[in-house]
Image: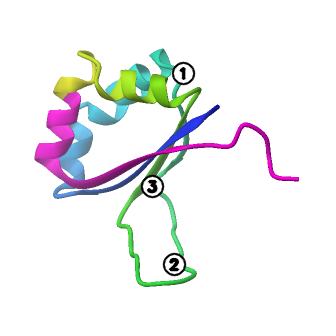
Amino acid sequence: MPAYLLADVAPHDMDAYRASGYLEAVVRIASDYGGRYLARGGEMQCLEGDWQPRRMVIIEFPSMERLRAWYDSEAYAPWREVRQGLADSRLVAVDGLEAPPA
């Protein structure tokens, strides 16, 4: 069953965030675990409630196990620290559906 990482990431300085190499490195590392980016920044519209994410990232993984293997990996660990130093982040992992609802 797929699993999704939903991240609300607000870089303190987008130029420094880009210059760090994080954006390129994490795509490669996530793909090693079957991760596929579905959204990365872009326009957002709040349709209900008062949640105002600043920059949304959605990554699909083949399973929660693969998502956690990526997040906990030695390859991602130094880049997680880069993100945490350069941005305010909120990350949530959620299981997807085995099959679409009927």
Please, is residue 9 above or below residue 98 in the view?
below
Whole-angstrom CA distance, mark 2 to mark 1, is 29 Å
| Residue 46: mark in rendering | 2
| Residue 34: mark in rendering | 1
Locate residue 13 relative to residue 34 in the image: left or right. Answer: left
Read off the residue under disc 3: 41
Residue 61 lies in quadrant: top right
Q: Give residue 8's position: percent from left, percent from top.
A: 36, 57
Rendering colour mode: rainbow
Q: Amino acid at mark 3?
A: Gly
Q: Nearer the viewer, residue 57 or 69?
A: 69
Residue 89 is covered by the magenta coloring: yes
Whole-angstrom CA distance, mark 2 to mark 3, is 14 Å
Tell me the SS state at disc 2: loop
| Residue 77: mark in rendering | none
Q: Amino acid at mark 1?
A: Gly
Residue 97 lies in quadrant: top right
Q: What residue do we see at 22% from left, 44% from top?
A: 17
Tell me the SS state at disc 3: loop
Q: Which residues are magenta?
A: 79-102
How would you rate the neighbour count of disc 2 (Cα within 10 Å): few for under 14, some for 14-19, many for 20 or more? Answer: few
Q: Amino acid at mark 2?
A: Cys
Q: Give residue 42's position: percent from left, percent from top.
A: 50, 59
Tell me the SS state at disc 1: loop
